């Protein structure tokens, strides 16, 4: 017997899962709209040269397929697609632009290459840079997580340009491996690299550059750094000063994002506890739009993505989401075959009278006692019993039923 299943990495979402995701999506949309962000939708399929973002994203990170136009790919994130759309359709005087999105992304599994389908929400702020733009996006991230009721999470801050500069002492052939170990928090892998002792010690010092902002900045004050790096450090310090005092902020100068188009601030939101989960991440990418502009004109950009499955799992675990699918408010029951027409009419009448209510029709022609028991099990609030003569008898479940219906 053949068992049909979705492909590896795909999932069937049943009503409870959909209802939970809808609850999250609606609240995130409300927050983004309050901040002046507007929704954008880009194609699920893009040309591969769009998705690799000028080499910042390795082709192995893209699920590809062939058609008459050549090699296409399923988007591994939305940032490159939105940058492409902005460069293609917006003139310089249209900036700044505030976009938000809610969409699926697709990535190959790192071990077996199977396509992983993930649900994301996120924002992109294009055409603005500086302290206030960075602060806006971080505060919007905080607002998004707090409106969902998430607590016990920390915000990791870093700077891609600063980290890249700190990697310069390593030979070019070693930088990708050191970078990967830092990005994956792989201290064991870092120890195993066959580096000269001095560079080995430097790699471990970079790995440990995380902690309370004041402590990390004090530690870096003893390092020899260029004026540019000192400016970046001051920017981080000033940015931290604009964040809410209750926020658990960690300065992590080993923080490196998966994709390599970031040029400045990078950040991640991580849940706390014995099994921390990545809730969201983002950063500044001031060169990305220029990759897609025919004249090479760029616009600064910064944004973040939220990992909806991780957020949903956290909310379910902490009882912040519904544990059952929303029930119907009414069940309309025809008591005879001839009652089908008036039952349909009454169900439609209820839907029009109360547009926010859920009204369904009993279709299985079961005995009233069975109908009532199933309705109670499904938490339906009221039953409308409809006779062939179009008479309506209403029963509120939990109250003694009307005589003659058993």
Image: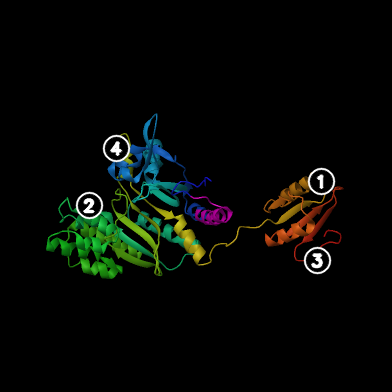
Quarter the C terminus occupies? bottom right
**Which residue is depicted at the point 43% across and 55% down?**
307
Mark 4–mark 1 contact, CB under 8 Å?
A: no
Mark 4 or mark 3, which is nearer to you?
3
Mark 4 or mark 1, which is nearer to you?
1
Mark 1 or mark 2, which is nearer to you?
1
The answer to whether residue 311 shows anywhere in this view is: yes
Q: Which labelled disc corresponds to residue 400?
A: 3
Q: Regarding mark 2 in the picture, which secondary structure is present there?
A: helix
Q: Along the line of sight, which residue is nearer the eye, 215 or 255?
A: 255
Q: Which residue is tagged 2?
A: 176
Magenta residues, start to end: 11-28
Q: Which residue is tagged 1?
A: 337
Few, some or many residues within 10 Å of mark 2 (<14, 14–19, 20+): few
Chief SS of the magenta region: helix
Label whose residue precedes the other's in the sequence (4 or 1): 4
**Which residue is depicted at the point 39% across and 58% down?**
138
Label whose residue precedes the other's in the sequence (4 or 3): 4
* 26 in the magenta segment: yes
Label whose residue precedes the other's in the sequence (1 or 2): 2
Few, some or many residues within 10 Å of mark 1 (<14, 14–19, 20+): few
Q: Quadrant of residue 19?
A: bottom right
Left or right relative to 93: residue 196: left
Q: Which residue is tagged 4?
A: 296
Label whose residue precedes the other's in the sequence (2 or 4): 2
């Amino acid at each position: 017997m053949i068992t049909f299943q979705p492909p590896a990495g795909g999932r069937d979402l049943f009503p409870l899962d959909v209802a939970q995701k809808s609850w999250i999506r609606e609240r995130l949309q409300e927050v983004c709209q309050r901040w002046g962000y507007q929704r954008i939708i880009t194609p699920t399929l893009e040309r591969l040269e769009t998705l690799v973002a000028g080499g910042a994203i390795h082709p192995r990170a893209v699920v590809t397929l062939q058609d008459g136009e050549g090699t296409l790919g399923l988007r591994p994130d939305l940032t490159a697609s939105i940058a492409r759309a902005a460069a293609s359709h917006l003139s310089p005087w249209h900036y700044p632009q505030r976009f938000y999105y809610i969409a699926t992304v697709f990535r190959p599994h790192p071990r077996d290459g199977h396509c992983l389908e993930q649900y994301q929400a996120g924002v992109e702020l294009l055409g603005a840079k500086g302290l206030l733009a960075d602060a806006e996006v971080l505060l919007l991230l905080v607002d998004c997580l707090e409106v969902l009721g998430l607590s016990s999470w920390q915000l990791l801050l870093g700077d891609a340009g600063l980290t890249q500069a700190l990697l310069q002492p390593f030979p070019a052939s070693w930088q990708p491996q050191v970078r990967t170990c830092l990005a994956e928090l792989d201290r064991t892998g870092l120890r195993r690299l066959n580096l000269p002792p001095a560079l080995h010690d430097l790699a471990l010092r970079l790995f440990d550059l995380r902690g309370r902002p004041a402590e990390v900045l004090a530690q870096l004050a003893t390092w020899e750094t260029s004026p540019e790096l000192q400016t970046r450090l001051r920017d981080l310090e000033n940015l931290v000063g604009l964040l809410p005092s209750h926020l658990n902020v960690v300065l992590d100068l080993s923080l490196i994002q998966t994709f390599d188009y970031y040029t400045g601030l990078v950040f991640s939101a991580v849940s706390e506890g014995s099994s921390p989960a990545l809730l969201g991440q983002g950063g500044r990418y001031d060169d990305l739009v220029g990759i897609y502009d025919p004249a090479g004109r760029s616009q600064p950009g910064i944004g973040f993505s939220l990992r909806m499955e991780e957020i949903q799992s956290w909310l379910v675990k902490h009882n912040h989401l519904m544990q059952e699918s929303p029930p119907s408010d009414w069940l309309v029951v025809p008591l005879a075959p001839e009652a089908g027409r008036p039952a349909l009419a009454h169900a439609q009448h209820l839907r029009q009278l109360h547009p926010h209510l859920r009204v369904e029709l009993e279709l299985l022609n079961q005995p009233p006692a069975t109908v009532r028991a199933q309705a109670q099990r499904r938490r339906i609030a009221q039953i409308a019993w409809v006779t062939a003569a179009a008479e309506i008898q209403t029963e509120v479940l939990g109250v003694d039923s009307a005589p003659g219906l058993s």
